[in-house]
Image (cartoon, helix red, strand yellow):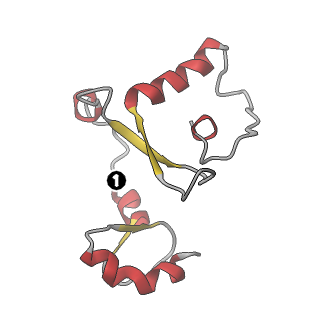
Amino acid sequence: ELFGSVEPLLPSLREDGVAVWVLGAGPYPPGAVALQELLDAASEELRPEDVWEPRDMNETCLYIFTSGTTGLPKAARVSHLKSIMCLSFYELVGASGRDVVYLALPLHHMAGSL
């Protein structure tokens, strides 16, 4: 839906080495990676644990983006360890997959996104 806004920027993004991934119905111009095709072709089998286990728990797991309250929005690094610590909170309070969690924080806030 928003791809039309990014499409004119594709040539300059390619020059800067930025990959553009798109999920949804295509077709897309060269330079955009259509994720749906990759998802459809992916195996349902999990790989051995040593393939996807991080070498160092302090390595970057994901980036969240700040809201920009103290300046422009920017990426904030979240380690594997911090992600697991956030997941452990749910285990600590006895939450399960049957529970519904109301999220009052925006998703760009780490407590909201994890």
Out of 14 and 53, give the one closest to the viewer: 14
Query: Residue tagged by mark 1?
Result: 42
5 shown above or below 96: below
> Image check: 4 left or right of 9?
right
On screen, residue 47 versus residue 95, left or right, reads left
Question: Is residue 111 placed above or below 1 in the rendered structure?
Answer: above
Q: Position of residue 79 (x, y in %)?
A: 39, 33
In screen coordinates, is 32 left or right of 26? left
What residue type is disc 1 on? Ala
Residue 40 appears in which quarter of the rendering?
Answer: bottom left
Quadrant that contains the C terminus: top right
> In the figure, is residue 14 to the left or right of 106?
left
Quadrant (top left, top right, bottom left, bottom right) of the N terminus = bottom right
Count of marks overlaid on the render = 1
Q: Position of residue 111 (x, y in %)?
A: 61, 34
SS for dot 1: loop
Which residue is drawn at the image coordinates 33% and 75% (left, top)? 13
Q: Residue at x 28, y 28 (%)?
A: 49
Label 1 crowd bin: few (<14), some (14–19), many (20+), radius 10 Å: few
Residue 66 vs residue 35, the one in the foreground: 66
Taking 42 as reference, is 92 above or below it? above
**Residue 100 or 9: which is nearer the viewer?**
9
Residue at 67% across / 20% down in the picture?
Answer: 95
Q: Residue furthest bottom?
A: 8
In percent of width and height, residue 97 lies at: 64, 28
**Nearer to us in this view, 28 or 85:** 85
Q: Position of residue 48 (x, y in %)?
A: 25, 31
